[in-house]
């Protein structure tokens, strides 16, 4: 990846970078509605929550090997880390880095909507442990860009509104930040993946995009219902805390984290036969081992 000096782009430069990436995401030929559909050629590297971990981001991008045009990378939950800079959240930088990556590898980098991005774009309070992150994030923009912070803030909101909810593969995997909780199923719109998102979809508690990015504690019966409706064998998600990096929750759900010291990624050959979550869990790669795997 070509390194772009994000800090010296200025407000207009960062905003334009984000808007160019937005255009690429919206025009992805593999996208239908709020879901990206991958074929059966190449490799998919799936990450869990990243939460502004710049070291893990660099390792993940290297391991994705995007110089091969058949390889794909999934990213989500990019912002709102636990560590502050001058008592502000500077994770706008991670969004800019990812926008740069999208521009360099269009149609290969797939950024899914997650609850922290949704919260930032719609001014919904959320915390990762360092305080109220949406306010801390705006403070970071103000610290760097001053009166021009609104230019970057507006572009970030447009970028986040362009993010799909899910990525599906021909061999039966569906990746999303989370899935609706069992308690939301009565109001959740099962057809949301086949259409573009509307403002109402982001509404706290009642919006289907909100439910899909914030949902927890899914049960086997619910997962089977979703899998049958969406033609899925195995779901891969983040959102839940997984201290060991990855855990199979029954046969149809694999949860992974990529932000902490035991974080992992999951490389999957798109032509492989997928059976269940425990078998997928055998393929996980600790992010700490990526340097050795690449011969660094």
Image: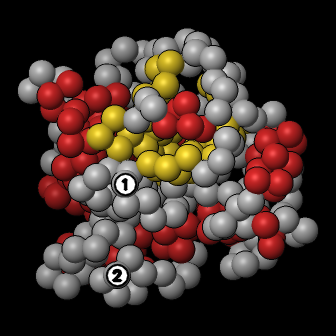
Mark 2 — residue? 129
Mark 1 — residue? 244
Give whichever of 127, 13 is nearer the camera. 127
Give whichever of 90, 258 is nearer the camera. 258
Q: Position of residue 269 (x, y in %)?
A: 50, 18
Q: Is residue 176 visible?
A: no
**Going by the image, does 29 lie left or right of 195?**
left
**Going by the image, does 270 lie left or right of 184?**
left
At 43% across and 59% down in the image, what residue appears? 242
Packing grade of label 2 (10 A; few <14, some 14-19, many >=20) is: few
Q: Nearer the viewer, mark 1 or mark 2?
A: 1
Where disc 1 sits, the SS reads: loop
Give whichever of 240, 1 is nearer the camera. 240
Q: Position of residue 55 (x, y in %)?
A: 19, 49
At 35% across and 23% down in the image, what residue appears? 66
Of all residues shown, which one is farthest toward the right?
186
Q: Quadrant of the N terminus?
A: top left
The first of marks 1 and 2 along the sequence is 2
Packing grade of label 1 (10 A; few <14, some 14-19, many >=20) is: some
Q: How many marks?
A: 2
Where disc 2 sits, the SS reads: loop
Please tell me whether residue 250 is drawn above or below residue 82 in the rendered image: above
């Amino acid at each position: 990846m070509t390194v772009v000096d994000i800090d010296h782009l200025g407000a207009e430069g960062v905003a334009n970078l984000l808007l160019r990436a937005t255009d690429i995401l919206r025009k992805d030929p593999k996208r239908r509605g709020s879901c990206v559909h991958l074929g059966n050629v190449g490799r998919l590297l799936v990450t869990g929550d990243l939460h502004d971990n710049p070291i893990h981001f660099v390792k993940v991008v290297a391991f994705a090997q995007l110089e091969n045009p058949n390889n794909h990378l999934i990213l989500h939950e990019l912002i709102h880390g636990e560590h502050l800079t001058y008592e502000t959240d500077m994770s706008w930088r991670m969004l800019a880095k990812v926008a740069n990556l999208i521009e360099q590898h269009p149609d290969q980098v797939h950024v899914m909507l997650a609850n922290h991005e949704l919260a930032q774009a719609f001014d919904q309070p959320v915390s990762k442990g360092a305080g109220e992150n949406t306010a801390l994030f705006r403070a970071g923009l103000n610290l760097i860009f001053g009166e021009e912070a609104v230019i970057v803030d507006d572009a970030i909101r447009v970028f986040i509104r362009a993010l799909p909810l899910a990525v599906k593969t021909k061999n039966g995997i569906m990746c999303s930040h989370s899935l609706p909780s069992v308690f939301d199923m009565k109001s959740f719109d099962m057809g949301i993946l086949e259409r573009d998102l509307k403002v109402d979809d982001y509404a706290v508690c009642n919006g289907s995009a909100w439910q899909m990015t914030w949902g927890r504690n899914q049960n086997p019966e619910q997962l089977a219902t979703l899998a049958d409706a969406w033609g899925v064998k195995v779901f891969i998600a983040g959102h839940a805390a997984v201290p060991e990096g990855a855990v199979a929750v029954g046969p149809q759900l694999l949860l992974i984290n990529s932000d902490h010291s035991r974080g992992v990624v999951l490389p999957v050959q798109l032509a492989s036969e997928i059976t269940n979550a425990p078998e997928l869990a055998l393929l996980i790669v600790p992010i700490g081992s990526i340097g050795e795997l690449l011969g660094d």
